[in-house]
Amino acid sequence: MKTIYLVRHAETTWNLEGKVQGSRDTPLSLDGLAQTAKTVAFLSALRFDTIFTSPLTRARAIAEPVGINLGVSPIVMPELREIEFGGWEGHTWNEIETMYPATLAAWELKSLEARPDGGESLTDVGRRAEKVRSMVESSSGELVLVVAHGGLNRVLMSVLLDLPISSYNNFTQPNACISIFEAKTSKWQARVIDSTCHLV
């Protein structure tokens, strides 16, 4: 039975300031550094066969030390990068509402073709998530670690559970949370969603 541990990166300085990050490579906050250490310690007690990570530093900060502790080299997947928000990146949602009211309204209606100014649509992200699912399913071993981002992870969770991509907002993805999925056949089932128990 294949099992995925899907992890979101820890808190960054932009998370703390309420700014949209997207593809920007932003640093961890002080709390984020502590969350990262706790998450690495928890995950290092498991025996992952394969580790996939986003190329962004905030995700690799978890994947790489876990890989070192377990002797597993993480596979960097560009498809695991966060949703690209284009001109929205670096701004708060209030600022975005003022600067880009029309495109934000379309995005909030969960239109699959709506896209942030200069960014990518949910359809684009869904295609990336499908590639990630295929890579995970074809990977060697039974226990897989995937470290990525809140937006991408929520789309990937929808894809794994064969839900509409627009259902991604049904998941919350707090910083450094862990979700666990199992598959006995080609059907994935959620065992744990958005857990932060390891941070206590």
Image (cartoon, rainbow, N blue to C red):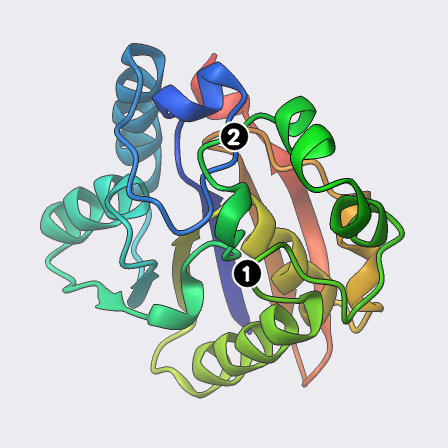
Location of residue 78 with respect to 169 vertically, above or below: below
Q: Is residue 101 rendered to the left or right of residue 9?
A: right
* Residue occupying image coordinates x 66% and y 44%: 192
3D distance between C-alphas at marks 2 and 1: 14 Å
Q: Is residue 93 rendered to the left or right of residue 131?
A: right
Location of residue 38 with respect to 82 vertically, above or below: above
**Tags 2 and 1 touching, CB below 8 Å:** no
Q: Where is residue 71 in the image (x, y as percent from the top left)?
A: 10, 58
Q: Nearer the viewer, residue 112 or 139?
A: 112
Q: Is residue 191 rendered to the left or right of residue 45?
A: right
**The disc labelled 2 sits on which kind of residue?**
His
Q: Residue at the right extreme?
A: 109
Q: Position of residue 169 (x, y in %)?
A: 78, 46
Q: Is mark 1 on a helix, strand or loop?
A: loop
Q: What element carries label 2?
A: loop
Label 1: how many Cα within 10 Å (few below 14, some 14–19, many 20+): some
Q: Position of residue 85 (x, y in %)?
A: 54, 51
Tell me, for residue 91, which label it has, or none: 2
Q: Is residue 55 rendered to the left or right of residue 2?
A: left
* Residue occupying image coordinates x 23% and y 45%: 57
Quadrant in which residue 27 is drawn: top left
* Residue occupying image coordinates x 36% and y 20%: 13
* Residue occupying image coordinates x 23% and y 40%: 61
The residue to which callout 1 is attached is 119
The quarter of the picture where the N terminus appears is bottom right
Between discs 2 and 1, the one toward the N terminus: 2
Q: Where is residue 68 in the image (x, y as percent from the top left)?
A: 10, 50
Label 2: how many Cα within 10 Å (few below 14, some 14–19, many 20+): some
**The disc labelled 1 sits on which kind of residue?**
Gly
